[in-house]
Amino acid sequence: MEYTVKSGSPEKQRIGCVVAAVYASRKLSPSAKILDDVSGGVISNLVRRGELEGDIGQTLLLHNVENTLCDRVLLVGCGKEKDLSTPNFRKINQAMVKRLQASGATEIASYLTEAPVKRRDITWKIGQSIEAIDECLYHFNQLKSDQKPPRRPLRKFIFSVSGRGQLTDGEVAVRNSMAISTGINLSKDLSNLPGNICTPSYLAKQASVLQEQYLNIKTTVLEENEMEKLGMGALLAVSRGSREAGKLIAVEYMAGDKDQAPIVLVGKGVTFDSGGISLKPGAGMDEMKYDMCGAASVLGTIAACAELQLPMNIVAIVPTVENMPGGIAIKPGDIVTSMSGTTIEILNTDAEGRLILCDALTYAAKYEPDVVIDVATLTGACIVALGEHPAGLLGNHSPLINDLLSAGQKSGDRCWELPLWDDYDEQLKSNFADIANIGGKGAGTITAACFLSRFTKKYHWAHLDIAGVAWKSGHHKGATGRPVSLLMQYILDRFEGTQSAM
Ligand code: BES
Ligand code: MN
Ligand code: ZN
């Protein structure tokens, strides 16, 4: 998709379709008003007759509106003018795309950017529009035999800005959001691929492709024998049960100052989680191909950073394995030694994510990181606690937590903090080893994070449990690409922070 910004009056756009807002109680937006005036009241007449109330997501497509240069005018209901929320701004953009896809228009000028959203500027509105549009246009059909593209695909969106002064801001927003979309789509593609294709070796290969594709990226892949030498007994314990070899992937994007400590992102890459000997129930088990969404999101994020050539240092670490039962698989009660030396009693082989993450988190210290953020579909309990709206957030450094909370608010890809109190840590006591890998009844998301926190003492760390947000189940099953948007907002905010400090 091609995106641009432009200032100019709606009736003068020589284009397939002009999109304008109508607010609740049939109130016309400024651009709808202009189109109405030049056409001798066409819009106000239709609205008076009840063709469009202006409720969120309602649409009305008009052809040949007099005294305009466009082929069509699409009116989109935006709800109460003073009450447009950030999620609803995305909704109106999606309603726009759905209606346009059913029309013959290919080039669009959107004036929805003039709809007021509290505390949000034009940069934000253009960014959210692009993310919403690209979300509608994403389809995973690479494994279907019939891959016919739509008859007349949308080709170009022009976003209206109110004057020349907003052009540069708008262009920056377009550039950033297109890079973010690239990252989101990469993340969705990797996630939607099935476990028989997207194996640990496949992830390693795709991570190596990033090095070919982008400047300033270096990818290294540690094989099982190298992990053995480093003492990664916890990661290797999970990998044992599978025919697929486990890997530890490190993608280093180093475009910042040499002495700038990197932001390290660690993504859980279980390419299929059967539960192992603590086997999961059969219903819905196919969805455990999504147990590598954390990995996909950190790879997508680093691709977006490289696309923008941000002058920063970012590292993505992906511990990746397949969790399977088998004759040499780990068993409940087995005790293993992690890279940190901490011994772990594996009471449930289905709590495998923390086992691979703990060794990756220990490994991360070698980068002397500024912060470490791990991203993982870690616990079903997180879905019980928070549902599918925010990711769970825990960590050991409140400024980092606050930065992530506000990046979530701003991007719309939200997270919510849970308490990482010592009280919960007691639940991980083991009779036979330093620590158990499950915390028993209650607060499963928190005890999982307590487990990880044992391995993150050397740096500032936050953990995102994305079990509820990484994919949608049911009829529209598919990966969401979350939290690429959140991570990119965090990184861009950090980048702006360094700019204004200079
Ligand atoms: N990958 C799962 C978590 C999960 C479950 C994510 C369902 C999304 C949907 C993780 O490896 C797991 O199995 N966790 C267990 C932990 C338990 C054994 C302490 C869980 O949540 O049941
Ligand atoms: Mn599991
Ligand atoms: Zn898992």
Image (cartoon, rainbow, N blue to C red):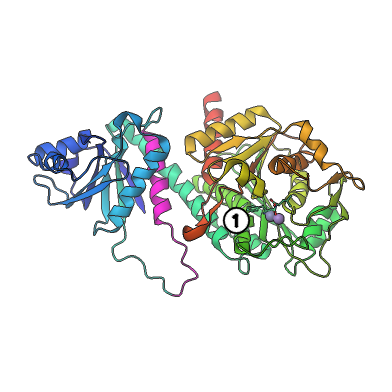
Residue type at mark 1: give it. Gln
Point out the image quarter for the N terminus: bottom left
Question: Farthest bottom residue?
Answer: 145
Question: Farthest left residue?
Answer: 40
Which of 20 and 280 lies nearest the eye of the viewer? 280
Q: Is 233 situated above or below 439?
A: below
Q: In this view, does 322 lie to the left or right of 178?
A: right
Q: What stretch is highlighted in magenta?
A: 122-145
Ligand 3 has an atom within 8 Å of the beta carbon of the residue at disc 1: no
Which of 460 and 380 lies nearest the eye of the viewer? 380
> What x and y, as percent, mark residue 55?
29, 40
Question: Farthest front residue?
Answer: 441
> What x and y, as percent, mark residue 104?
24, 59
> Is residue 134 magenta-colored?
yes
User: Residue at (75%, 67%) from the top-left corner?
Assistant: 242
Q: Name the residue under label 1.
A: 211
Residue 216 visible: no
Q: Is residue 81 left or right of residue 10?
A: right
Point out the image quarter for the C terminus: top right
Question: Farthest top residue?
Answer: 501
> Is residue 457 magenta-colored?
no
> What x and y, as percent, mark residue 398?
66, 28
**Label 1 environment density (alpha carbons within 10 Å; few <14, some 14–19, many ≥20):** some
Which of 190 and 218 lies nearest the eye of the viewer? 190
